[in-house]
Amino acid sequence: ETGVTQTPRHLVMGMTNKKSLKCEQHLGHNAMYWYKQSAKKPLELMFVYNFKEQTENNSVPSRFSPECPNSSHLFLHLHTLQPEDSALYLCASSQDGSGGYPDTQYFGPGTRLTVL
Amino acid sequence: AQRVTQPEKLLSVFKGAPVELKCNYSYSGSPELFWYVQYSRQRLQLLLRHISRESIKGFTADLNKGETSFHLKKPFAQEEDSAMYYCALSVGYQKVTFGTGTKLQVIP
């Protein structure tokens, strides 16, 4: 599959569970992002990785732990989440911002997370 | 902090009518602005960006720094334009702030 893929597409977990979301991009990009999309709220940037280094943490609680082992893969590890963390989690990728202007972001289909 | 406001949650227009999706922003610097679109059962994707000054699928958007607006316009709406539209502002090269989105419904 081309573009940005995310697995799983749907996830239901209890508050004491540990789970991980996976994102993979096949576009040769060097930047990857996690966003949270809740009902009736704007898309919220959570984390940015550029060349595997975290460059942005938008005050995200520590129960969300990102991991970027290489420029093509991005994980979001989840631990002791709360029901209010239920949302659509979107992954995106882009070039590395070295062109002198913001790069277009390419989004995955998202993981619909429900925390019971 | 930067903010993007899309005042309309839903905009319904008849096919062939003009469309204007409103977007206002607050940012003290020189912004880079985008419109993203999400069609039914498809992923979020870039529609256009102000730096390109291009027209995509008949849509245009002009940055008005005086009014801090970046409204999206199309002279004649088509049914396939029905989708969620998000205005976004970029601070730096990678930090993007999105609006809450406007659902455009084109009535046949």
Image (spheres, coloured by chain):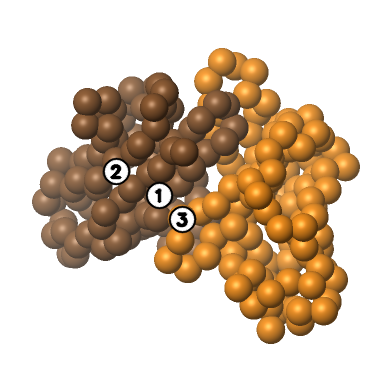
Chain colours: A orange, B brown
How far across and down, in percent of the image, does residue A72 sit? 79, 40
Q: Chain of mark 1?
A: B
Which class describes the residues within 10 Å of circle 1: few (<14), some (14-19), or many (20+)? many
How far across and down, in percent of the image, does residue B59 sit? 27, 38
Taking the image as shown, residue A111 lies to the left or right of residue A69, namely left
Residue located 66% across and 64% down the image: A111
Q: Which residue is mark 2?
A: B23
Confirm whether residue A70 shows in the render: yes
Which class describes the residues within 10 Å of circle 2: few (<14), some (14-19), or many (20+)? many
> Three-letter amino acid code at disc 2?
Cys
Q: Secondary structure at mark 2?
A: loop
Q: Is residue A66 above or below residue B61?
A: below
Taking the image as shown, residue B38 lies to the left or right of residue A60, namely left
Q: Which residue is mark 3?
A: A42
How many marks on residues? 3
Q: Is residue A36 above or below residue A27?
A: below
Whether pointer 3 and pointer 1 mark residues with C-beta atoms closer than 8 Å, the reply is: yes
Marks 3 and 1, Cα distance to the nearest angstrom? 5 Å
How far across and down, in percent of the image, does residue A83 sit? 64, 77
Whether pointer 2 and pointer 1 mark residues with C-beta atoms closer than 8 Å, the reply is: yes
Taking the image as shown, residue B7 lies to the left or right of residue B45, namely left
Marks 2 and 3, Cα distance to the nearest angstrom? 13 Å
Residue located 78% across and 30% down the image: A51
Are the residues under badges 3 and 1 in a single subunit? no
Q: Secondary structure at mark 3?
A: loop
Residue located 33% across and 23% down the image: B53
Of residues A45 and A72, which is closer to you in this image? A45
